[in-house]
């Protein structure tokens, strides 16, 4: 049996071996891009509607510690949504034409948005939980000024200090391919400890706050089982429970996977999909407002 190969057959075999892995890699990357394109398109559309409805309600609301925090949350969502069209364009064209520095900014913004949202959720939840566990009602009297000062400090840090840190330290990598973006897995090697700490902290805090919130709701329900739904405090705590559920659904799965991904950078496409799912917290305003949104909107149209 003749096992020799002609030069033409050998050349064809070598070309097939070289092309097949690349083609499979491109097909896999294309599948992830389609998934990311769908997710970010839904987030952009629904997030814009959510923020518009919330602004329509809050424009006539009295200033309080909670409403100021919600305004900050809206602004954080708004800044992030401004960067989503750049992601959508990249996943449609499969080419980045805006330079590595803007790529780093857009890439970092999803993380900034996630951790800022998480921080603001914590503030809202702690503000509402504190009176039930400390047996004091002095939070609202001091909270307004603290919220205003805290908001100013927070946005000064976010809008001035963080961009300079991003341009100098975020996404440090030897890859100079300016036609591609959002590939900074290799840069995690120098920040493994920080990533472990942040992911563990988010998981623990989210679980603890959910347990505390559920305990408060159960306590209020036991006090007055029949009339609890008509009580303002119970309604506020129920909305807070929605925030904790958003933290569990949007943030905990990503950070749980991240604990494994830190040592497995080749799983970057899966990490990107889970990271994109965290952006569904932009829809939190719809959950926060509930039926009151549509009543007020309809009332506004008839005026």
Image (cartoon, grey):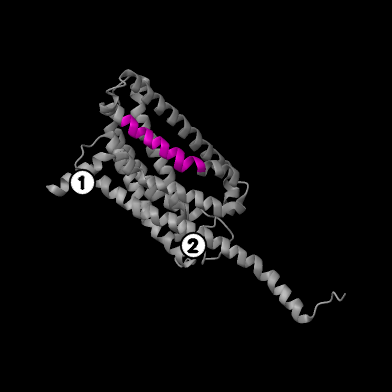
Image position of 275 (left or right of 135): right
Can you say whether 296 is above or below 146 in the image?
below
Residue 174 shows up from this direction:
yes
Report the front residue among 41 and 183. 41
Task: Kindly state the secondary structure of the residue where label 2 is placed.
Answer: helix
Q: Position of residue 116 (x, y in %)?
A: 40, 43
Identify the mark at residue 5; answer none if there is no mark: none
Task: Kindly state the secondary structure of the residue where label 1 is placed.
Answer: helix
Image position of 151 (left or right of 106): left
Tell me what residue is drawn at x 35 percent, y 33 percent: 240
Identify the mark at residue 297; answer none if there is no mark: 1
Residue 104 shows up from this direction:
no
Residue 274 lies in the magenta-colored region: no
Image position of 205 (left or right of 269): left
Specify the segment rendered in magenta: 236-253
Report the front residue among 67 and 188. 67
Residue underneath mark 2 = 100
Q: Residues within 10 Å of mark 1 (few under 14, many from 20)?
A: few
Can you say whether 286 is above or below 109 in the image?
above
Q: Position of residue 127 (x, y in %)?
A: 34, 30
Report the front residue among 220 and 174. 220
Tell me what residue is drawn at x 86 percent, y 76 percent: 2
Distance CA(mark 1)–CA(mark 2):
43 Å
Q: Main secondary structure of the magenta part?
A: helix
Tell me what residue is drawn at x 33 percent, y 38 percent: 150
């Amino acid at each position: 049996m003749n096992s020799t190969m002609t030069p033409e057959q050998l050349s064809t075999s070598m070309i097939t071996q070289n092309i097949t892995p690349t083609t499979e890699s491109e097909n896999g990357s294309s599948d992830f891009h389609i998934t990311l394109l769908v997710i970010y398109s839904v987030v952009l559309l629904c997030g814009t509607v959510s923020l518009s409805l919330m602004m329509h309600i809050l424009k006539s609301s009295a200033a309080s510690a909670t409403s100021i925090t919600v305004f900050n949350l809206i602004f954080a969502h708004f800044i992030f949504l401004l960067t989503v069209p750049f992601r959508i364009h990249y996943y449609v064209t499969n080419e980045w034409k805006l330079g590595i520095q803007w790529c780093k900014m857009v890439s970092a913004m999803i993380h900034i948005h996630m951790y800022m949202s998480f921080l603001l959720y914590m503030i809202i939840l702690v503000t509402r939980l504190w009176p039930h566990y400390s047996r004091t009602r002095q939070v609202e009297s001091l909270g307004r000024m603290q919220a205003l000062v805290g908001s100013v400090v927070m946005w000064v840090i976010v809008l001035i200090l963080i961009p300079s840190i991003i341009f100098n330290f975020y996404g440090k990598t030897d890859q100079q391919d300016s036609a591609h973006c959002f590939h900074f897995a290799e840069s995690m090697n120098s920040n493994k400890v920080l990533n472990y700490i942040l992911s563990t902290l988010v998981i623990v805090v989210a679980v603890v706050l959910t347990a505390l919130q559920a305990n408060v709701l159960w306590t209020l329900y036991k006090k007055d089982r029949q009339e609890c739904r008509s009580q303002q405090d119970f309604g506020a705590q129920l909305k807070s429970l929605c925030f904790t559920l958003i933290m569990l659904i949007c943030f905990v799965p990503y950070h749980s996977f991240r604990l494994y991904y830190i040592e497995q950078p080749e799983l970057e496409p899966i990490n990107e999909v889970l990271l994109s799912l965290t952006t569904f917290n932009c829809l939190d305003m719809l959950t926060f407002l509930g039926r009151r949104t549509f009543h007020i909107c309809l009332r506004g149209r008839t005026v």
